[in-house]
Each structure stands twice: as structure tokens, then as C-alpha cells.
Image (tube, coloured by chain):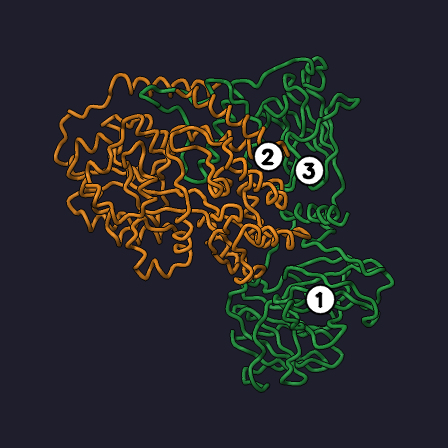
Chain colours: A green, B orange
């Protein structure tokens, strides 16, 4: 059961790859400078928001990069920012208090923020020693049961046991507006525990990849996780309405999410489309589907890959393997489609030569192109030019085409 | 309909060319023509700039025209024996050699360069260049698929050295939308590595399909469990996106993938292919060899210029520079003692993989095998059909298609 749930989670996660493209503003290998800061005592969780002269931001979202306490210099925090980010704002309390814009010169800076949010900047070191080495961090989000108060994150590296935080219960997680709590951990972490109520309740050890992750925890501490925001994956199901060519027997639908490749159905040619009262062939599919193929004759004739918008009901009129129209508003059912011509089901139409010709050639081209850029076409064997399989008409193409 | 007409026209044209012998090798060649060599190619600018520069230096008496040709293979079929339209040479992959050899438009390289002068070349590159006992290509560089991994997730000491270790890793790490390993499991070019590693084959050396051979069936049976831990849809873009965006820990991909993932900031590692526990042989992917082929017409009409250019292309530094420009591995064995090559992690990984790689079949019959094998892989990996039955059916279909070709 857990495996099935896991797979479902994976499906949900993967389908939004295209929707939730990660846009990291900061590359792991670029030059960085440390920004040190002293902030008023009531500024909790100081952060730095940084950008360059053109407005390019160093961090994805306000309040920006989290500052860490410098263990060698009490009262000082530090945050590494890209060297190109020469404008910063220091803020605290989840971005609710902040300084004005501060200009930097591309080198390390020491910023002292007063109670009234005014500031002084020094390029002369005001701390002793170097800042701890830059370590990339990733976000861990948790949604916990209502009985879990003040959730915290405990994180470490297994099997060596190096802890990311000084003492249990670890780092307090910050509440977001969407019901998720968030904290960050260094990328060398591969194991976490979510806890709450001052560490009195907790999940079991969770082995994870160091990548942004969403963990859902129930009252008993049972947890499931996903590497894609589940909220973004929760699109409602949609209905696809299909009009297929009359000579496509028993039309089926194949549906998936590109580019991650999550299929809706277990095996080709997918599932049969069923006629509804209006005469359309219909199927309910997950809202995350963005690619479909309609096929017939046990998958031996098919459309090309058809891109569709996610989360919308679809009306799809197919008139040939590469001829189709997509609409997201209801349209009139064309005459002569497979759905309107009930007699079609009784017809026994073999895959047409043309379809075989088209698909065989295209598939082989796709295979070969990837490697050598060569195309299969008529060629000569023994000095006699012949047409490859197409002319023979025996190559019924049975496979979903390459995307 | 339009497509059919085009095919018919193509057939008629080829028949006409074959039967009427448009080739006119006896036509006189002017001095200027005799010292001009036209090479068709499909390469990126960086590679061609290197080639152009070296050829200008190495054979100053020959004017070499490098012409990028879209749909090169089609064009060659149409004009391969037409002296007014054919190129003198072409720079391309080895896998179409059989087609052109059967069309009798290629000159064996060894009729220009003595066989013993090709000894410095890696044996499998010459094997790739050989069709029916004749060497038709001067190899320049080659590529193989590589085992690539994201060091953020898979530290160097966790890289699986065997396929069972890989499977255990996949079971442990495929969770929450992340995959321990992804590959194009139902694409023949990628599945070939597993089949070859079992001693099976898609197409045998004699041109007969090997889909229902015991070894091929064993490979497909074994490979299924790996496919079950990957997404169902594993086309090129899917696999690359999963790896590039950090959703997959490792993959088997071409060297062309590496610049992209490095650009994204990934610390990508390259490792030897895992050894298949059942056979104690590494996953053995196809090897593609890029090189120079000489058209028969040119060899007859411009023998001196052709030989000069070929000899220039045998220059060690030229091969090194071309390999580095293309991100591939040089075909000459002696290039690997040079620092520029020996210090290149990717090139050296390709060299290691090449020790077990199998040259992609260069026989004409291979054209039909891509589709038939693709269908077989879909049946086995995506539709859950019986492997032996599916293989037997695919074999029968392949035999029919090959027979139809003849």
C-alpha cells in the first residue's frame, strides 16, 4: 500500500515538473562574498535580499537568503551572496522588518543595523577570522497535524552521523501562508526528522535526497514526502472528448505528462474511449495530462503526439494520423466520426499502407537521427533499388511514437 | 498522398541512376577540378572550423570545400554516382556504409591507403568501418553512451559497479518523484547495451535479426526489472530533463548531454558501465564512428587530391583537435598518450566504455530493425507482454521486412 501511495506521489510530483520549473538564481559554482550583519535583538531569523544593477535577483523569493549566526563572533550573522549582487536589504521576522537598500562594492561587507533600521556599512572587517565556508542549502517543507505545534527540523548526514544543528529538536521551522512550515539544511544532509511540541513528537528517520522536499506528517508521526510541491500537482481531473476517423476501430486514448513521461495508463494502446450521450468518445483523465495520442485498430493507427493544456476539458477532432484540432470549449460533433458511425466498430480495417509508411519511416528516422542523423529510405541491395517496409505493407506500427 | 508520390519519385530516380549508369568516370577532369575536393558533412561549426584549418595547413595544394548538407544520406542516394552533383567525400557516421557499399558508390579506403598504415587505429573503429570485408571509412572519432551520475546524490564511492548494485540503488532511491537511475529503456539504441552485454544482438553480422536468440531474450527478461523502476515514458527529452533537473540520480546518456548538465551547475560524474552480474560483461552500448568516406567517382577522377586529403585526416593532432571539438574520443590509439586526451575525464571514460562497446551495425537491414526492436521493447517494458512470445513475433516480423527489402 505504501509503495502504491509512493508511486502516486511520484506521479503527482513528476507531472508538475513542467509547471514548476526550478529557477535557481544562484548557481552552485559562482563567486560569492560574505555579508555580515548585526541586527536588533528583536529581529529574528535575519535574511538578505540581494540583486544587481539590472534588477536580477540572487534569491527566488522574499525574504531572501537566510543568515546564520557566526559561531566565532557572537552577535554577528553572515550570509553568502553572489559577488555580482551589489544591492542588498537586510530584513528579519520573516521579512516584516527591513533596512532600506544598501549598496555594496562586490566585496565582503559588515552591516550594523540599528533599532530604527538605519544602518552602517563597513568594508573593513569587524569580525575575527573568516566566515564559515559557503554551503549550499535546500528547503524542507512540512505540513503537520494540527496537534503538532512549533514544528522543528532535525537533520544529519548518514552514516557518519554529522548533525546539521547543534541540539535537539534542531531548527525551528517557519510557518508559511499556505499551511507549510519551512526550514533549510545544508546539501550534505541526507536524513531528517520532523518534530514538534518541543521535540516530544516526531517522525521516524526519513532518508532523503538533498533537494527541495515537501513532507506531510499525520498526528501519529507517519510521513510521506515528495520532491515537487503537492499543491501544484493537485489539478482536478478533466474530460477529453474525441471524434476519431470512422475507420479507426475501437479508438483508445494514450495520455501522459511531458517531459517527465508519467503515463496515465499501464500499457499501450491505453484505454478505450467510450461514447457518451452526445456522441463524443470520452474519457476522464488526470488534470496534469499535457500530451495525448488517439489510436485505433489495437494501436496500429495513431495520431502524432498531441499537446494539450493541463486542467482543462478538451474537445479533440481527429481526422488522420497527423490531422487534428484541439478545442477547450465545446464544439459540434463532426459528421462521420467513429463515435457517430456505430457501424464502424464492425469494420475490419487493416492498418493502411499510408499509415504504415508514415509511421515506420518516422520512427526509424527518430531512432537514427538521435545517433547519426541518418534517415532510412529507399536503398539498393544487390544493385536493385527497393522501397523499405512501407511498400510491402506488412509493417503495422504498434507502438507509441517517439516524442 | 504527397508522401507516396515523393517515395515513388525517389525510387524511380534511384532506379534510373542505377540502371542507366549516370556515373561518368571517363569524363575529363580539369586541373582545377582535380585539385578541388568537396566534402559533405553534418557537423557543427566548431568541428568544421578545426578541420578546415588543419586541411589548409596539411594539404595546401588542394582546395577543400566543406559543405554542410541537410539530409545528407538522402542526397547521397540520389547523386552518389553523378559526377556533376556528387561530393568527393563525406564526413559522417559509419552506420550507413552498407547501404552505399551496396549501391557501389564507395571506394574502399584500403585501395588508397595501404591497410598497414591503418594499424594505429583502434580495432573496433576499423571494425565499424568494415562492410563485407572492405574498409570504407577512415575513422576520425567515435562516441559511446556513458554512465553519468549527479554527485550531489550519488557520491563517487556509491557508484554501482554491477547491475545488481545498480538495481539495489534504484530500489533504495526511487521515491517521492526522484529516480535512482533512468534511461531510454524502450529505445533500441539504449537497450542495445543490455542486449549486447548478454551476448545477444539486434542484428547479427550476417544481417539476420537476433531478436529471438536465447541471449537477447535473457537480456530483455533481466532488463525488465530495471525498467519497472523508471517512468513508463522514457523518450529522449524525458530522460534528459529528469537528469538535468535533478530528478534522477544517474542515467546512461551520450557525451552530448554533459555540456548541458554542467551548464545547469551539476557536478556530473562519468563512470564505467556497470558489469552485468549474469554475464560478467559490462553494459555494452553501441559505438558510433564518425569518419571520412570516399566516393568511387572521386577516387577514380581525382586520385592524388583524394589521397592527400585522406592522409591529412590521418594526422594525429588533427584527430585530437577534432575529437575535443566534438566532445568525442579519437579513433587513433596513439592519441591517448597525449595529455590533452589523457586528462579529459569524459574522453577517457568513452575509451574505457569502447573496450566493450559494439559498433552499430552498418548493414542496410538495420534500417528495419529500429522499428521492430522498438515495438518489441514497448511490448515487453510497457505492455507487460511475454518476452519470449514477443521476441519470436518480432523476429518473424523483422525477417519478413528484410525479405521484402530484397
Query: Which percent across, then down, holds residue A296?
Result: 64, 23
Q: Residues within 10 Å of mark 2 (few under 14, many from 20)?
A: many
Quadrant (top left, top right, bottom left, bottom right) of the C terminus of chain A = top right
- Residue at mark 3 shares a chain with residue at mark 2: no
Query: How far is disc 3 from disc 2 in space, using C-alphas?
Result: 18 Å
Chain of the residue displaying label 2 = B
Q: Which mark is residue B143?
A: none
Q: Is residue B163 above or below residue A385?
A: below
> Disc 1 on helix, strand or loop?
strand
Tell us which disc is closer to us: 3 or 2: 2
Tell us which disc is closer to us: 1 or 2: 2
> Disc 2 on helix, strand or loop?
helix
Q: Which residue is mark 1?
A: A183
Q: Is residue B61 left or right of residue A347?
A: left
Q: Is residue B142 above or below residue A398?
A: below
Q: Is residue B264 above or below residue A12?
A: below
Tell us which disc is closer to us: 3 or 1: 3
Query: Which percent across, then down, holds residue A212?
Result: 66, 59
Chain of the residue displaying label 1 = A
The answer to whether residue A363 shows anywhere in this view is: no
Name the quadrant containing residue A92.
bottom right
Query: Which percent across, then down, holds residue B315?
Result: 23, 50
Residue at 55 percent across and 18 percent down: it is A352
Residue at 54 percent across and 38 percent down: it is B218
- Residue at mark 3 shares a chain with residue at mark 1: yes
Amino acid at each position: 500500500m505504501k509503495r502504491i501511495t509512493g508511486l502516486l506521489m511520484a506521479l503527482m510530483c513528476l507531472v508538475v515538473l513542467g509547471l514548476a520549473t526550478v529557477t535557481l538564481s544562484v548557481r552552485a559554482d559562482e563567486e560569492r562574498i560574505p555579508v555580515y550583519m548585526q541586527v536588533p535583538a528583536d529581529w529574528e531569523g535575519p535574511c538578505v535580499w540581494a540583486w544587481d544593477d539590472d534588477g536580477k535577483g540572487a534569491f527566488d523569493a522574499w525574504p531572501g537568503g537566510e543568515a546564520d549566526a557566526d559561531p566565532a563572533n557572537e552577535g554577528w550573522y553572515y550570509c553568502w551572496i553572489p559577488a555580482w549582487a551589489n544591492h542588498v536589504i537586510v530584513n528579519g521576522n520573516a521579512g516584516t522588518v527591513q533596512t532600506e537598500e544598501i549598496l555594496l562594492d562586490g566585496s565582503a561587507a559588515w552591516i550594523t543595523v540599528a533599532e530604527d533600521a538605519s544602518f552602517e556599512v563597513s568594508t573593513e572587517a569587524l569580525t575575527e577570522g573568516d566566515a564559515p565556508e559557503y554551503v549550499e542549502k535546500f528547503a524542507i517543507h512540512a505540513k503537520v497535524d494540527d496537534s503538532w505545534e512549533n514544528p522543528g527540523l532535525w537533520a544529519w548526514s548518514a552514516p557518519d552521523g554529522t548533525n546539521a544543528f547543534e541540539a535537539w529538536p534542531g531548527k525551528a521551522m517557519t510557518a508559511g501562508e499556505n499551511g507549510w512550515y519551512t526550514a533549510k539544511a545544508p546539501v550534505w544532509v541526507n536524513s531528517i526528522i520532523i518534530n514538534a511540541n518541543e521535540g516530544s513528537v516526531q517522525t521516524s528517520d526519513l532518508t532523503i535526497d538533498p533537494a527541495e522536499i515537501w513532507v506531510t506528517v499525520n498526528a501519529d508521526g507517519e510521513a510521506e514526502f515528495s520532491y515537487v510541491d503537492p499543491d501544484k500537482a493537485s489539478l482536478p481531473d478533466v474530460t477529453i472528448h474525441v471524434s476519431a476517423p470512422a475507420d479507426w476501430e475501437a479508438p483508445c486514448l494514450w495520455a501522459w505528462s511531458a517531459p517527465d513521461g508519467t503515463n496515465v495508463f499501464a500499457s499501450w494502446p491505453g484505454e478505450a474511449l467510450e461514447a457518451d450521450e452526445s456522441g463524443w468518445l470520452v474519457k476522464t483523465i488526470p488534470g496534469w495530462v499535457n500530451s495525448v495520442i488517439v489510436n485505433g485498430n489495437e494501436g496500429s493507427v495513431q495520431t502524432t503526439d498531441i499537446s494539450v493544456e493541463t486542467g482543462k476539458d478538451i474537445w479533440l477532432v481527429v481526422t488522420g494520423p497527423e490531422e487534428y484540432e484541439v478545442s477547450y470549449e465545446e464544439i459540434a460533433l463532426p459528421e462521420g466520426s467513429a463515435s457517430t458511425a456505430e457501424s464502424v466498430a464492425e469494420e475490419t480495417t487493416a492498418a493502411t499502407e499510408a499509415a504504415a509508411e508514415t509511421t515506420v519511416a518516422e520512427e526509424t528516422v527518430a531512432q537514427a537521427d538521435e545517433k547519426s542523423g541518418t534517415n532510412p529510405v529507399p536503398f539498393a541491395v544487390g544493385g536493385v533499388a527497393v522501397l523499405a517496409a512501407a511498400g510491402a505493407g506488412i509493417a503495422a506500427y504498434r507502438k507509441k511514437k517517439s516524442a | 498522398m504527397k508522401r507516396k508520390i515523393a517515395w515513388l519519385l525517389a525510387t524511380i530516380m534511384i532506379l534510373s541512376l542505377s540502371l542507366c549508369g549516370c556515373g561518368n568516370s571517363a569524363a575529363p577532369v580539369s586541373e582545377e577540378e582535380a585539385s578541388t575536393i568537396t566534402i559533405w558533412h553534418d557537423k557543427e561549426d566548431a568541428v568544421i572550423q578545426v578541420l578546415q584549418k588543419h586541411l589548409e595547413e596539411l594539404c595546401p595544394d588542394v582546395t577543400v570545400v566543406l559543405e554542410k548538407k541537410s539530409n545528407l544520406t538522402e542526397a547521397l542516394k540520389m547523386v552518389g554516382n553523378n559526377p556533376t552533383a556528387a561530393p568527393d567525400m563525406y564526413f559522417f557516421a559509419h552506420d550507413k556504409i552498407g547501404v552505399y557499399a551496396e549501391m557501389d558508390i564507395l571506394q574502399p579506403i584500403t585501395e588508397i591507403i595501404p591497410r598497414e598504415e591503418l594499424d594505429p587505429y583502434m580495432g573496433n573503429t576499423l571494425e565499424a568501418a568494415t562492410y563485407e570485408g572492405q574498409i570504407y571509412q577512415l575513422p576520425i572519432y567515435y562516441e559511446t553512451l556513458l554512465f553519468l551520475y549527479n554527485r550531489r546524490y550519488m557520491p563517487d564511492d556509491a557508484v554501482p559497479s554491477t547491475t545488481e548494485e545498480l538495481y539495489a540503488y534504484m530500489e533504495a532511491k526511487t521515491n517521492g518523484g526522484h529516480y535512482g537511475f533512468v534511461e531510454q529503456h524502450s529505445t533500441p539504441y539504449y537497450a542495445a547495451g543490455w542486449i549486447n552485454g548478454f551476448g545477444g544482438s539486434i542484428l547479427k553480422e550476417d544481417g539476420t535479426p537476433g531478436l529471438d536468440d536465447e541471449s537477447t531474450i535473457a537480456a530483455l527478461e533481466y532488463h525488465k526489472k530495471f525498467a519497472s523502476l523508471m517512468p513508463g515514458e522514457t523518450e529522449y527529452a524525458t530522460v534528459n530533463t529528469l537528469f538535468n533537473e535533478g530528478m534522477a540520480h544517474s542515467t546512461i546518456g551520450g557525451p552530448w548531454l554533459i555540456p548541458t548538465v554542467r551548464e545547469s551547475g551539476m557536478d556530473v560524474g562519468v563512470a564505467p558501465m556497470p558489469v552485468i552480474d549474469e554475464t560478467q560483461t559490462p553494459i555494452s552500448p553501441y559505438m558510433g564512428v564518425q569518419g571520412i568516406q570516399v566516393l568511387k567517382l572521386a577516387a577514380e577522377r581525382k586520385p592524388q587530391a583524394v589521397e592527400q586529403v585522406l592522409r591529412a585526416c590521418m594526422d594525429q593532432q588533427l584527430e585530437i583537435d577534432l575529437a575535443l571539438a566534438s566532445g568525442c574520443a579519437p579513433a587513433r590509439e596513439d592519441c591517448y598518450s597525449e595529455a590533452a586526451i589523457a586528462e579529459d575525464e569524459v574522453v577517457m571514460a568513452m575509451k574505457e566504455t569502447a573496450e566493450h562497446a559494439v559498433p552499430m551495425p552498418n548493414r542496410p537491414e538495420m534500417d528495419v530493425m529500429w522499428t521492430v526492436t522498438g515495438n518489441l521493447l514497448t511490448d515487453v517494458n510497457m505492455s507487460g507482454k511475454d518476452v519470449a512470445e514477443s521476441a519470436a513475433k518480432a523476429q518473424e516480423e523483422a525477417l519478413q521486412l528484410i525479405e521484402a527489402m530484397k
